[in-house]
Amino acid sequence: MSAVRPPTTRPGSVTVVVVLTWLVAFLSIVAGVVMLVTPDDLLAEAGISAGDAAVYSWVEIVFGVITALVAIGLSHGNSFSRLLVTLLMALRAAATLWVVIAWWGTAGTWSALLSGLFAVLVIAMLWNARANAFFAGH
């Protein structure tokens, strides 16, 4: 009979990643909805076209919903969820670069930078030694 492996407790770094992932999901959804309902004249004053705002809004909302769903699996030590969160955060960082370059100096620049910083933080904490041990145990 094989020995039963005791359950691996989730390290604090993974718990922080789960919280940050939920925060990124929430901020993405809120940012997308806010920009989606922002009047065109206000967008124009900020230097953002209505078409660009609509695309960015839906990308934000989709990223947010997917990130929230995957955060559930991540909190349970699911390695596939870890990979998906890493991928989503990498895409978030890439989207941040696009927004910063395309909309430099507009209101969208700072919210994108904040979102991008959260994404980089999530990736760094998700791949430390204790997190690796937690995911290897599941």
Image (cartoon, rainbow, N blue to C red):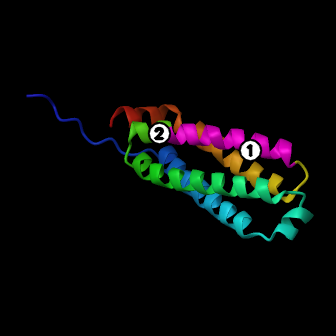
> What percent of the width, then of the height, locates residue 25?
57, 56
Q: Nearer the viewer, mark 2 or mark 1?
A: 1
The amino acid marked with disc number 1 is Thr
Residue found 28% across the figure and 42% down from its top: 7
- Locate residue 53 relative to residue 83 in the image: left or right: right
| Residue contact at pointers 2 and 1, CB within 8 angstroms | no
- Locate residue 45 relative to residue 33 in the image: left or right: right
The quadrant in which residue 6 appears is top left
Is 16 inside the magenta-drawn segment? no
The amino acid marked with disc number 2 is Arg
Q: Which residues are magenta?
A: 84-103
Residue 125 in view: no
> What percent of the width, then of the height, locates residue 23?
59, 57
Q: Earlier in the sequence, mark 2 or mark 1?
A: 2
135 in relation to 53, above or below: above
- Residues at marks 2 and 1, CA–CA distance in whole angstroms: 21 Å
Disc 2 packing (10 Å; few <14; some 14–19; many ≥20):
many
Mark 1 residue element: helix
* Camera-nearest residue between 52 and 24: 52
The quadrant in which residue 40 appears is bottom right
> What percent of the width, then of the height, locates residue 133?
41, 32
Give the residue at mark 1: 96
Give the residue at mark 2: 82
